[in-house]
């Protein structure tokens, strides 16, 4: 439900970036969305399309790269993808593993072309 | 075609404001907690009985977020401490800017503790840093033991999970052992406190948690200075 404000933050970031590069227009923005970031990809894309058009970037596309949840074990050093909700270490059974990836909500890049 | 590398958080602006708030809270020695739960889990009730248990000269204030109505601030102000409503008008979470604005006019040097009651929602508030010392997630025994599994983001970010309404346990099929296990699955190191705002059970442990954590936070702030 907050995807619209997130989409707005992405569009604003693109608008600000383009201001620094006269003579170009943005064509694609790359975003990383983690499994537990709390963001729904489809709702984000829906809000983004409307807001991008509103900002004057009707041809701007959103490229969402999804990141699954990965944890690492401090005891045996193993790194693993969390399947379901099981966060204990599959190697040594340690319960207190730490999250390495999966909560991303990052803008990776903005692709621009000459006008 | 040229690619400009950005590599920053989408909510960078919120992060920046939250960092400023955190700095402000540290300067004034304010311990800040951000309460997150579904609507109806008992955030306001927990705050009501927390405020009622505090001495009248405690330097505590409350900000409470809702989409509409001033009802919660009215309820909380009855305890005699400053309470302000943040009415988001549709937004499903509080963000750092709303907190910054809501603090205007309060003498921050006179505050020791600030409770922020977020909009009732287990999803969106977990993405927004408010400069708090800790997020607290509440869920109540009428909600189902698998709630932590359904909302992994907030359960893995919260430092304390409060299981509320335990006075209702005799009337429900809620397996509190399983609920605790699910909380720990999402966040192995999290603290869990079971409370009933109705009977007062567990409140002592909760107040002790606030005291211990706020002392640790002020020691840390002093060390930085």
Image (cartoon, rainbow, N blue to C red):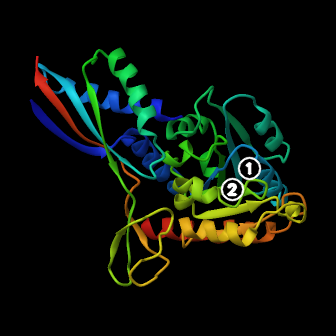
**Closer to the camera, B11 or A103?**
A103
Chain to which the residue tagged by mark 1 belongs: B
Decide: few, some or many residues near mark 2? Use Cα within 10 Å; few <14, some 14-19, many ≥20. Answer: many
* Residue B158 shown left or right of residue B174 in the figure: left
C-alpha separation, residue under disc 1 versus residue under disc 2? 7 Å
The residue shown at (40%, 59%) is: A69
Q: Quadrant of residue B83?
A: top right
Residue that numbered label 2 is attached to:
B138
Residue that numbered label 1 is attached to:
B43
Question: Can residue B150 be seen by looking at this rendering?
Answer: yes
The residue shown at (90%, 65%) is: B170
The residue shown at (38%, 27%) is: A48
Residue A93 position in % (x across, y down): 46, 82
Q: Mark 1 near mark 2, Cβ–Cβ under 8 Å?
A: yes
The answer to whether dots 1 and 2 both sit on one chain is yes
Q: Quadrant of the N terminus of chain B?
A: top left
Q: Secondary structure at mark 2?
A: strand
């Amino acid at each position: 439900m907050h995807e619209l404000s997130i989409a707005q933050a992405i569009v604003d970031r693109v608008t600000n970036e383009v201001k620094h590069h006269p003579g170009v227009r943005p064509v694609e923005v790359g975003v990383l969305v983690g499994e537990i970031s709390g963001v729904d990809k489809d709702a984000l894309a829906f809000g983004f399309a409307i807001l991008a058009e509103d900002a004057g970037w009707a041809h701007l596309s959103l490229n969402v790269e999804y990141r699954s949840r990965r944890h690492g074990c401090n005891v045996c050093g193993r790194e693993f993808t969390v399947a379901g909700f099981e966060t204990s270490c599959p190697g040594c059974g340690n319960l207190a593993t730490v999250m390495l990836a999966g909560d991303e909500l990052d803008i990776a890049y903005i692709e621009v072309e000459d006008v | 075609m040229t690619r400009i590398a950005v590599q920053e958080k989408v909510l960078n602006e919120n992060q920046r404001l939250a960092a400023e708030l955190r700095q402000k809270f540290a300067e004034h020695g304010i311990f800040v907690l951000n309460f997150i739960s579904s609507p109806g889990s008992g955030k306001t009730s927990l705050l009501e009985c927390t405020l009622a248990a505090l001495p009248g000269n405690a330097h505590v204030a409350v900000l409470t977020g809702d989409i509409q109505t001033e009802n919660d601030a009215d309820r909380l102000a009855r305890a005699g401490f400053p309470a302000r409503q943040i009415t988001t008008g549709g937004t499903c979470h509080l963000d750092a800017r709303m907190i910054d604005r809501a603090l205007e006019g309060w003498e921050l040097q006179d505050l020791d503790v600030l409770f922020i009651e977020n909009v009732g929602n287990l999803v969106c508030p977990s993405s927004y840093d408010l400069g708090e010392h800790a997020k607290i997630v509440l869920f109540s025994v009428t909600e189902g033991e698998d709630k932590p599994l359904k909302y992994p983001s907030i359960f893995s970010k919260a430092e304390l999970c409060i299981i509320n309404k335990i006075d209702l346990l005799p009337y429900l099929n809620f397996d509190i052992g399983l609920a605790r296990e699910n909380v720990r699955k999402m966040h192995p190191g999290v603290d869990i406190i079971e409370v009933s705002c109705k009977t007062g059970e567990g409140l002592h442990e909760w107040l002790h948690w606030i005291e211990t954590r706020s002392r640790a936070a002020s020691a840390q702030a002093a060390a930085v200075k």
